[in-house]
Image: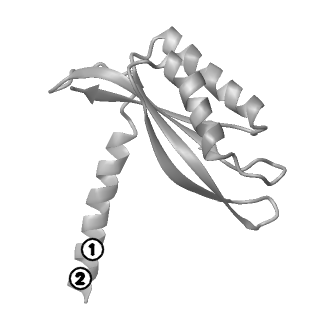
C-alpha cells in the first residue's frame, strides 16, 4: 500500500510541475511556430439569458453574428454551443446556455478594438452584465 501511495504522489507531483511551468509563459511570447504563424485566438462567451428571464433567440443570435461580428472579422469565425454555471451570491446554483465565439486574428489594435466593440454591442443590445474574453497566442496554419 505504501508503494502505491508513493507512486501516486510522485505522479501527481510530476503532473503539477508540468502545469506550473505552463503558467509562466507570457501571452506575448515570441517563440517561433514549428508550423504556421503566431496569431491571437480570442474566445468570447455570450450568455443567452436576459435578466428579465427570456432567452435570446437563435434568430437574434444569428443576426448579431451576421450583422455585427462577420463584417469586423471577414476572415471567418467559429461558434460553439456552451453551458455556463456558477454559484450565485445567494448560494444557489445558476446555469445558463451560452455561445462561445472563437476568433483568430493578428492581435493588432484594430482587432482588439473590434472585439471590445462587439462585447459592448452585445451587452447593450441584450441587457447583459458582461461578455467574458479569453486571449491566447497560438500557431495557425491553413
Residue 43 relative to residue 62: left or right: left
Q: Residue at x 60, y 45 (%)?
A: 58
The residue tagged 2 is: 4
Coordinates of residue 35 in the picture (x, y in percent): 16, 26
The residue tagged 1 is: 8
Q: Which one is in front, 27 or 103? A: 103
Q: Is residue 139 above or below residue 80?
A: above
Secondary structure under the numbered disc 2 in the rendered image: helix
Marks 2 & 1, CB-CB < 8 Å contact = yes
Q: Which one is in front, 77 or 95? A: 77
Judge the density around disc 2: few (<14), some (14-19), many (≥20) Cα neighbours within 10 Å: few
Tell me which corner region of the image, top left, top right, bottom left or bottom right, holds residue 39.
top left
Question: Which residue lies most toward the front here?
Answer: 59
Q: Which residue is drawn at 70% across and 25% down?
A: 120
Residue 121 relative to residue 13: left or right: right
Q: Which one is in front, 15 or 59? A: 59
- Determine the CA span between mark 2 and mark 1: 6 Å
Q: Which residue is drawn at 28% across and 80% down?
A: 5
Coordinates of residue 9 in the picture (x, y in percent): 30, 71
Secondary structure under the numbered disc 1 in the rendered image: helix
Q: Which one is in front, 71 or 26? A: 71
Q: Is any atom of residue 27 visible in this view?
A: no
Q: Residue at x 69, y 46 (%)?
A: 56
Q: Is residue 53 above or below residue 66?
A: below
Which quarter of the rendering shows the N terminus?
bottom left
Which quarter of the rendering shows the C terminus?
top left
Question: Which residue lies most toward the bottom here?
Answer: 1
Tell me which corner region of the image, top left, top right, bottom left or bottom right, holds residue 26.
top left
Coordinates of residue 49 in the picture (x, y in percent): 71, 50
Q: In this view, does 73 lie above or below 7?
A: above
Colour scheme: one colour
| Number of callouts | 2
Amino acid at each position: 500500500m505504501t508503494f502505491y501511495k508513493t507512486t501516486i504522489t510522485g505522479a501527481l507531483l510530476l503532473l503539477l510541475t508540468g502545469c506550473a511551468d505552463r503558467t509562466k509563459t507570457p501571452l506575448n511570447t515570441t517563440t517561433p511556430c514549428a508550423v504556421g504563424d503566431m496569431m491571437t485566438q480570442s474566445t468570447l462567451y455570450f450568455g443567452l439569458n436576459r435578466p428579465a428571464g427570456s432567452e435570446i433567440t437563435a434568430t437574434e443570435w444569428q443576426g448579431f453574428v451576421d450583422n455585427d461580428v462577420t463584417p469586423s472579422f471577414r476572415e471567418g469565425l467559429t461558434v460553439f454551443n456552451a453551458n455556463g454555471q456558477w454559484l450565485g451570491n445567494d448560494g444557489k446554483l445558476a446555469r445558463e446556455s451560452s455561445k462561445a465565439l472563437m476568433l483568430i486574428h493578428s492581435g493588432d489594435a484594430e482587432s482588439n478594438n473590434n472585439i471590445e466593440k462587439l462585447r459592448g454591442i452585445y451587452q447593450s443590445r441584450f441587457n447583459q452584465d458582461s461578455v467574458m474574453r479569453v486571449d491566447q497566442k497560438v500557431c495557425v496554419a491553413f
